[in-house]
């Protein structure tokens, strides 16, 4: 009798499996949107950090009396960043690449930052606010 398997143990019933699948579907339906929000916030944060580093590099370069101040623009259109040739020496002096990565977030996909010897002009209000600066339109 000990070696014989019990005949009434047939595994899970179809109803039990359907209930488990339904619970998993509800959890995924609730958690997936939250996960996507966190991913987008992470992309926005990474983009802001990259932009802030580029702006700070140009400001520090222009503040150094040993350097000739640069003027020009860094812009993004459709997520593709473009650095004007006149600004590249400031980025190179900071050890940054002059062909920065594309923007990953949709919130900061299009903007222009104009540098002169004395000021920084940001044309995107959301970006300027996130960077703690005043947005102005050139």
Image: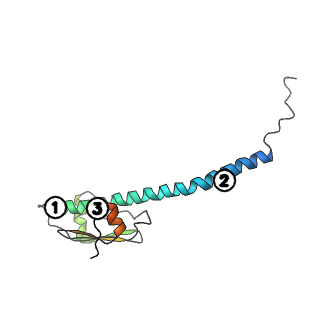
Q: Quadrant of residue 70?
A: bottom left
Q: Are marks 1 and 2 in contact (CB under 8 Å)?
A: no
If you read the primary sequence from the N terminus, does the residue marked by circle 3 or circle 2 appear first? 2
Position of residue 20 in the picture relative to residue 106 (left or right): right
Q: Are marks 3 and 1 in contact (CB under 8 Å)?
A: no
Res 136 seen here? yes
Q: Which residue is mark 3?
A: 54
Quadrant location, the N terminus: top right
Q: Which residue is mark 2?
A: 25
Between the C-alphas of marks 1 and 2, the distance is 57 Å
Residue 100, numbered label = none
Determine the secondary structure under disc 2: helix
Residue at the spot 70% in from the left edge and 51% down from the top edge:
22
Residue at the spot 80% in from the left edge and 44% down from the top edge:
13
- Above or below, 95 relative to 4: below
Between the C-alphas of marks 3 and 1, the distance is 14 Å
Q: Which-is-in-front pick, marks 1 and 2?
A: 2
Where residue 53 appears, as percent x and y from the top left, is 29, 58
Res 99 seen here? no
Where residue 69 appears, as percent x and y from the top left, is 16, 67
Residue at the spot 71% in from the left edge and 47% down from the top edge:
20
Determine the secondary structure under disc 1: helix
Between residue 136 and residue 120, name the one nearer to us.
136
Q: Which residue is mark 1?
A: 63
Position of residue 38 in the picture relative to residue 108 (left or right): right
- Above or below, 22 relative to 124: above
Where residue 105 appears, as percent x and y from the top left, is 43, 63
Q: Quadrant of residue 68?
A: bottom left
User: Dot 2, how many residues are within 10 Å of its Cα: few (below 14), some (14-19), or many (20+)?
Assistant: few
């Amino acid at each position: 009798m000990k070696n014989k398997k019990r005949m009434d143990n047939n595994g899970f019933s179809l109803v039990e499996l359907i209930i488990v699948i339904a619970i998993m579907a509800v959890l995924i339906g609730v958690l997936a949107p939250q996960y996507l929000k966190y991913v987008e916030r992470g992309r926005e944060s990474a983009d802001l950090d990259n932009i802030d580093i580029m702006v700070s590099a140009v400001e520090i370069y222009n503040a150094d009396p040993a350097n000739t101040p640069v003027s020009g623009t860094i812009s993004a259109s459709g997520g593709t960043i473009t650095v004007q040739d006149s600004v590249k020496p400031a980025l190179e002096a900071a050890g940054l690449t002059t062909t920065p990565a594309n923007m990953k977030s949709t919130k900061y996909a299009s903007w222009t930052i104009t540098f002169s010897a004395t000021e920084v002009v940001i044309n995107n209000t959301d970006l300027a606010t996130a960077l703690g600066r005043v947005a102005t339109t050139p």
